[in-house]
Image: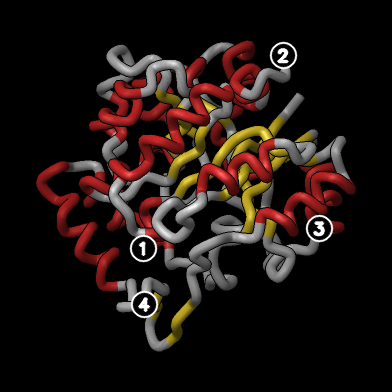
Amino acid sequence: MIIDCHAHFEPRMLELERVVAKMDAAGVDRIALIPAMNDPLPQTPERLLAVMRKLMRRPSTRALAERVHRATLTRGGDLRLGREVYAIYAQPDNARLAEVLAAHPERFFGWIFLNPAADPHVLDTLERWRHAPGFVGVKLHPHWHDYRTSILGPLLARCQELALPVLIHLGFGRRGAYRDLAAAFPRLTIIAAHAGFPFYDDLWAYKNALPNLHVDLSSPYIDEALARDAVAAMGPERCLFGTDAPYGFHEEDGSYDYGTIRGWVERMPVSAAQVDAMLGPNFAALIGLS
């Protein structure tokens, strides 16, 4: 079974019917969807992404990458790209995704998107949605929701108690204290999005010390070379196939190309069994599907 563990429910960019058609064409069996957290975004130029990847891979230049990121945020916490401002939603809509999961249980899983910085009743919100069919874990985004990960303690304790994996898009500095989180909750499965953005190599170095830490290989935040480095450092058993669809890679008609990152995984210099595991079984095991 091939499972995309990291994609977004964004019908304004890719209607659900086309998502299913593209899944079938690409041989993707199931997708773990994330509620939309922002207005639809334009494609980021690859030249800029390449520069940012290079800056983030070195501790000495990561602070510059952070300054570039902070410059894109408005005082109200939205995203400014050029002259356009795109809203970042403080509380993404889990209800709409729940409807999709109920209608298509054979094709989609869901991540419960939580933001403890904007939701004083975040534990109640978790309890509300964890019983909805199809949800398999919790998504957190301290990078764009702009909070220090130290506030996550009670929520992560509950996720650990419930054996719910957490997919987290780490932020810079104290907005991405992955070592503290993984060490404080050793029975909690933590998946660092986008190969451990924005830390990459520094995060991979703690593979042995933090056995509950995994990475997905999604998004143009990384490229094929960086994905290979992640697999070499973390080991294929700790890496998961994801796309970040519908962001990043597009076909000639402008729609999402589900084959790009799958190609990265299939070309990895590891055994065929390890490639197959990254494409689905690794994630299935983390959510208790196997």
Q: Measure the alpha-carbon separation of dots 1 and 3.
A: 30 Å
Q: Is residue 28 visible?
A: no
Q: In this figure, which residue is indicated by the disc labeled 4?
A: 76
Q: Measure the alpha-carbon separation of dots 4 and 2.
A: 43 Å
Crowd band around label 2 with a 10 angstrom C-alpha radius: few (<14), some (14–19), many (20+)? few
Ranked by sequence position, the earlier of labels 4 and 2 is: 4
Q: Is residue 277 left or right of residue 49?
A: right
Foreground residue among 242 and 182: 182
Which mark is on residue 47?
1
Residue 263 sits in quarter: top right
Secondary structure at numbered mark 4: loop
- Which tag is nearer the camera, tag 4 or tag 2? 4
In which quadrant will I find the N terminus? Answer: top right
- Which tag is nearer the camera, tag 2 or tag 3? 2
Q: What's the residue at 40%, 78% (across, down)?
A: 81
**Three-letter code, disc 3:** Leu
**Three-letter code, disc 2:** Ser
Ranked by sequence position, the earlier of labels 4 and 3 is: 3
Q: Measure the alpha-carbon separation of dots 2 and 1.
A: 40 Å
Q: What's the residue at 36%, 35% (across, down)?
A: 153
- Which tag is nearer the camera, tag 1 or tag 3? 3
Foreground residue among 137 and 10: 137
Crowd band around label 1 with a 10 angstrom C-alpha radius: few (<14), some (14–19), many (20+)? few
